[in-house]
Image (cartoon, rainbow, N blue to C red):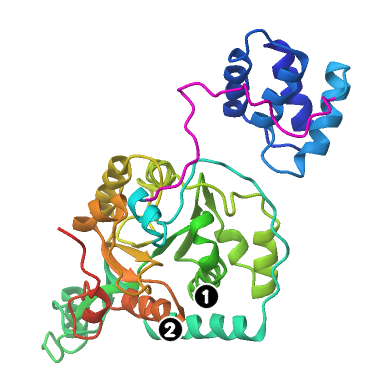
């Protein structure tokens, strides 16, 4: 145990991401070998403490320096090693009948966490045009909400103090009645963007959409990415230049294109930010295809709680552009009473979503946005 903990500290010093969960998994892997050989120690620690192929060379050097023995000359893990029942494999969520029939398999989801630094993103002319289109959509639709603070004007209640002061200046004659009304401020927007492997084809467009939202309203917009963990990326998106902002995101060691744990990430969001002013009366948009391996009940419970705290919860599904689309992800189906389901598969759908956020009273019932809810959920 002491050797393994010290070896984990050595790997962290060399730049590898080794948390407590990986060390615990390595201990269970070592306990599965009876008896334990030198090659078993190598493979059990390498398979549990390395998260990327690029980590193998660093791991081998640290293994040789720490244990004093060279790594075994095998090219694959021994076939006799088997994980215990407590480990959850990263398998695909798919229908076996569809697979046998040759149909398109369902989206994949897994538990694997892969912290990576993607290559720098270069925005083309078309990408910058998308950012401009999203910015125009957010600028044209400004979501407002009333607050308790009063402001002069309008046709609300009579401003008694101001009217009385005017009367005193005119011999106590009511020469004019002044009114006041509740002030209106911009409604907050919170974006939760799924960046798991199943969302890889939509990730860059969604990040450009988030950048445009932050650029239009930097003080009232918050953006988080969800995959196997929750990351707040608002600070990077507040950079003035879009290319600089995208490169700042690329420099983050985040779980891009990894597994999906929507329930855990949304639960963490509710635990940290659920009691914060940021969520109160805000528009909360969850952009995801809804696929994961965890039970849907915790995610649905958190969405139900957030629907009571926020102004409304909008689930933007990226699969709605497929022909004959019908939501089948268990988490999405069970969340039906608490969310508004809209499309997010292309630029036009995202621009419509920006317009929906500015339509305060509609709730997808006004003639302008009723068509966005044409994808019916199964009962």
Above or below: residue 30 compared with residue 204: above
> What is the secondary structure assignment of the residue under circle 2?
helix
| Region rendered in magenta | 71-94
Residue 100 is covered by the magenta coloring: no
Residue hosting label 2: 137
Cβ–Cβ under 8 Å for marks 1 and 2: yes
Residue hosting label 1: 212
Q: Quadrant of residue 69?
A: top right
Q: Residue at x 63, y 16 (%)?
A: 30
Above or below: residue 13 compared with residue 317: above
User: Relative to 18, is 331 on the left or the right?
Assistant: left
Residue 43 drawn at (x, y percent): 71, 25
Above or below: residue 61 compared with residue 101: above
Count of numbered marks? 2
Q: Residue at x 49, y 61 (%)?
A: 199
- Crowd tier of the residue under label 1, counting other residues whose Cα lies within 10 Å: few below 14, some 14–19, many 20 or above: many
User: Relative to 135, is 19 on the left or the right?
Assistant: right
């Amino acid at each position: 145990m002491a050797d393994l903990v010290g070896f984990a500290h050595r790997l962290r010093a060399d730049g590898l991401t080794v948390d407590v969960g990986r060390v615990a998994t390595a201990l269970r892997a070592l306990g599965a070998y009876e008896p334990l050989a030198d090659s078993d120690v190598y493979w059990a620690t390498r398979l549990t403490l390395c998260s990327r192929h690029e980590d193998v060379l660093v791991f081998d050097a640290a293994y040789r320096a720490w244990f004093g023995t060279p790594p075994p000359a095998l090219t694959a893990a021994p076939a006799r090693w088997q994980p215990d029942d407590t480990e959850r494999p990263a398998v695909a969520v798919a229908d076996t009948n569809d697979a046998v029939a040759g149909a398109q398999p369902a989206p994949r989801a897994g538990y694997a966490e892969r912290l990576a630094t993607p290559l720098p993103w270069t925005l083309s002319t078309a990408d910058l045009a998308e950012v401009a289109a999203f910015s125009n959509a957010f600028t044209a639709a400004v979501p407002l909400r009333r607050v308790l603070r009063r402001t002069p004007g309008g046709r609300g209640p009579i401003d008694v103090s101001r009217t009385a002061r005017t009367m005193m200046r005119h011999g106590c004659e009511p020469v004019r009645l002044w009114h006041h009304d509740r002030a209106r401020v911009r409604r907050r927007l919170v974006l939760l963007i799924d960046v798991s492997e199943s969302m890889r084809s939509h990730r860059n467009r969604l990040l450009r959409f988030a950048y445009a939202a932050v650029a239009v309203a930097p003080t009232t917009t918050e953006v988080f990415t969800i995959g196997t963990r929750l990351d707040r990326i608002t600070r990077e998106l507040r950079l003035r230049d879009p290319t600089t902002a995208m490169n700042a995101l690329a420099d983050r060691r985040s779980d891009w294109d990894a597994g999906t744990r929507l329930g855990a990430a949304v639960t963490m969001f509710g635990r940290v930010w659920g009691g914060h002013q940021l969520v109160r009366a805000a528009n909360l948009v969850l952009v995801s295809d809804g696929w994961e391996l965890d039970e849907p009940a915790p995610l649905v419970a958190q969405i139900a709680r957030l629907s009571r705290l926020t102004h409304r919860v909008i689930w933007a599904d990226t699969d709605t552009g497929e022909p004959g689309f019908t939501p089948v992800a268990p988490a999405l189906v069970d969340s039906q009473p608490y969310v508004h389901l809209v499309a997010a598969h292309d630029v036009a759908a995202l621009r419509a979503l920006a317009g929906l956020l500015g339509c305060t009273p509609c709730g997808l019932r006004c003639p302008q946005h009723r068509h966005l809810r044409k994808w019916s959920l199964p009962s």
